[in-house]
């Protein structure tokens, strides 16, 4: 059964944070463009962007130790942390613009101030953290970072972690108060409510079955609704922002840029505290060091979260494995993503990552008691009855052939794949994804709408004052932006209210 065809300027596939961000940017720049969004679930922000499916850290590289590698000479390379911090500042500026222009209200519905901390144990790790602190605290982007290995000071910062801890092992932490907790699920829903008010056509319970080039160069989408009716939709530009589901749709588009790319799914499990007395004793996001052989996205962290305006406490993530590419996906997702053009890439990745496979199998087999043992490295007196397990979202790590890594290299990060003519783009990969959504969508616009970027530039600069500039090289602008975003997003006053 089939219904008529429709034509539109832009189609966004997947109602997650990426499509919400791109749609909002485009509506500000070219309000007359018609935009249609297809989402297979009932609501926006229910898959990878959902607050229970991601860590909501507001990744500004303030506490994630995997962004600051130690070089062979012992020095600390903070270039990745600088890059991610600048990208997060772009998101903060855009959200501030939306609040200041009353396009979205109540920033506390999606962002809260929260100290970001790194914590390590053992002499060697303490020495590493001190070096990292010295390298970062001299940088304007990380101003205000503190370091301590004094148990009394740490007790002040993280009482839940320090109390009842044997005092014989060296322990140290860094703390920076300008961190945030971001509820990306709430932000996604807020942005789509705004887009709906701007006449963006929201189509929930609509699955995109196929994408192909039409004879006029546009894209034709075969879309099935929940009643089984098939619709045909045409657009000049398509953005595939379907989380783990993006890879299959990219492959269906047939663009050469989508060849030789595979995906490897990793799921996550968090422990959630249900004891209000325990939750009240902790007020920070505290990141530790990943275990040997563990992937970067499984760095253990003890996080205060604000979900539905309520304070929560989560620990994790424990890695898991499912062949699904989405939490609501199919058990055949991984198998059906293997094509003749990426077979060798996928096999090479399998051979190279035997330790990762072993690690994932071990993680899947962990009992709740074993998980409690890992939690007790953070909270020595944690009680099993205070904690429940929650399955987080699926992340699909990109596998591709690279010059540095050779065939079948597993990528940890976010990747944008675009057709040579810029008529279609797909977002693949995982963390720091949502936190850098505005930066990533500006990249998409640069690649896909180069002919418009000059005319759009002044409006983009109004939305993102640092656009085209390095904050690191413009410390005065950095100070200005810090003040602006803290005020617009009401971060200062809430800091006092919640501490």
Image: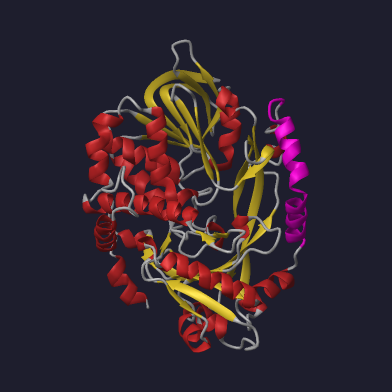
Judging from the image, the colouring scheme is secondary structure
Residue 274 in which image quadrant = bottom right
Q: Determine the main secondary structure of the stretch shown in magenta.
A: helix
Residue 326 in sight in this render: no
Q: Residue 195, relative to residue 176: is it above or below?
A: above
Q: Residue 96, relative to residue 136: is it above or below?
A: above
> Residue shown at 76%/53% (left/top)?
355
- 283 and 131: which is toward the camera: 131
> Residue shown at 30%/52% (left/top)?
93
From the viewer's perspective, tell me whether residue 208 is left or right of residue 98: right
- Report x, y in % for residue 303: 51, 68
- Report x, y in % for residue 228: 56, 29
Q: Based on the picture, tell me whether residue 364 belongs to the magenta stretch.
A: yes
Q: Which residues are magenta?
A: 340-365
Outermost residue toward the top? 215
Q: Based on the picture, tell me whether residue 142 belongs to the magenta stretch.
A: no
- Report x, y in % for residue 474: 28, 54
Quadrant where the C terminus lies? Answer: bottom left
């Amino acid at each position: 059964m089939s219904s008529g065809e429709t034509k539109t300027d832009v189609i966004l596939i997947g109602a997650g944070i990426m499509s919400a961000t791109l749609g909002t940017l485009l509506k500000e720049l070219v309000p007359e463009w018609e935009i249609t969004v297809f989402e297979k679930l009932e609501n926006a922000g229910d898959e990878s962007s959902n607050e229970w499916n991601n860590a909501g850290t507001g990744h500004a590289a303030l506490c994630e130790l995997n962004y600051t590698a130690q070089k062979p000479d012992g020095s600390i390379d903070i270039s990745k942390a600088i890059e991610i911090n600048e990208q997060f500042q772009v998101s903060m500026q855009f959200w501030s613009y939306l609040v200041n222009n009353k396009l979205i209200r109540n920033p506390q519905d999606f962002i809260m101030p929260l100290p970001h901390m790194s914590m390590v144990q053992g002499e060697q790790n303490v020495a590493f953290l001190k070096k990292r602190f010295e390298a970062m605290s001299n940088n304007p982007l990380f101003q205000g970072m503190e370091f301590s290995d004094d148990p009394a000071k740490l007790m002040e910062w993280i009482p839940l972690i320090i109390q009842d801890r044997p005092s014989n092992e060296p322990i140290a932490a860094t703390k920076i108060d300008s961190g945030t907790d971001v509820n990306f699920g709430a932000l996604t829903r807020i942005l789509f409510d705004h887009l709906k008010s701007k006449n963006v056509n929201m189509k929930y319970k609509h699955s995109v079955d196929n994408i192909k080039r039409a004879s006029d160069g546009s894209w034709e989408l075969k879309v099935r609704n929940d009643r089984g009716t098939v619709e045909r939709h045409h657009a000049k530009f398509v953005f595939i922002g379907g989380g783990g589901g993006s890879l299959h749709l990219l492959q269906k588009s047939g663009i050469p840029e989508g060849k030789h790319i595979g995906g490897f799914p990793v799921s996550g499990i968090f422990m959630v505290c249900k004891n209000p007395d325990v939750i009240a004793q902790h007020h920070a996001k505290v990141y530790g060091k990943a275990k040997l052989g563990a992937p970067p996205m499984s760095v253990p962290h003890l996080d205060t979260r604000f979900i539905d305006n309520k304070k929560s406490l989560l620990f994790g993530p424990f890695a898991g494995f499912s062949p699904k590419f989405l939490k609501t996906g199919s058990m055949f997702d991984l198998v059906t993503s293997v094509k003749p053009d990426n077979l060798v890439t996928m096999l090479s990745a399998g051979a190279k990552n035997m330790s990762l496979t072993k690690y994932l199998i071990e993680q899947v087999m962990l009992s709740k008691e074993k998980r409690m043992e890992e939690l007790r490295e953070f909270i020595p007196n944690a009680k099993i009855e205070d904690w429940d397990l929650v399955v987080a979202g699926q992340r699909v790590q990109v596998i591709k052939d690279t010059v540095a890594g050779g065939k079948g290299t597993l990528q940890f990060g976010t990747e944008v794949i675009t057709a040579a003519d810029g008529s279609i783009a797909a977002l693949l990969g995982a963390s720091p994804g949502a936190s850098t959504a505005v930066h990533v969508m500006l990249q998409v616009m640069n690649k896909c709408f180069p002919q418009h970027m000059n005319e759009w530039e002044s409006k983009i600069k109004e939305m993102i004052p640092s656009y085209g500039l390095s904050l690191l090289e413009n410390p005065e602008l950095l100070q200005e932006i810090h003040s602006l975003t803290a005020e617009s997003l009401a971060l200062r006053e809430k800091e006092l209210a919640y501490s």
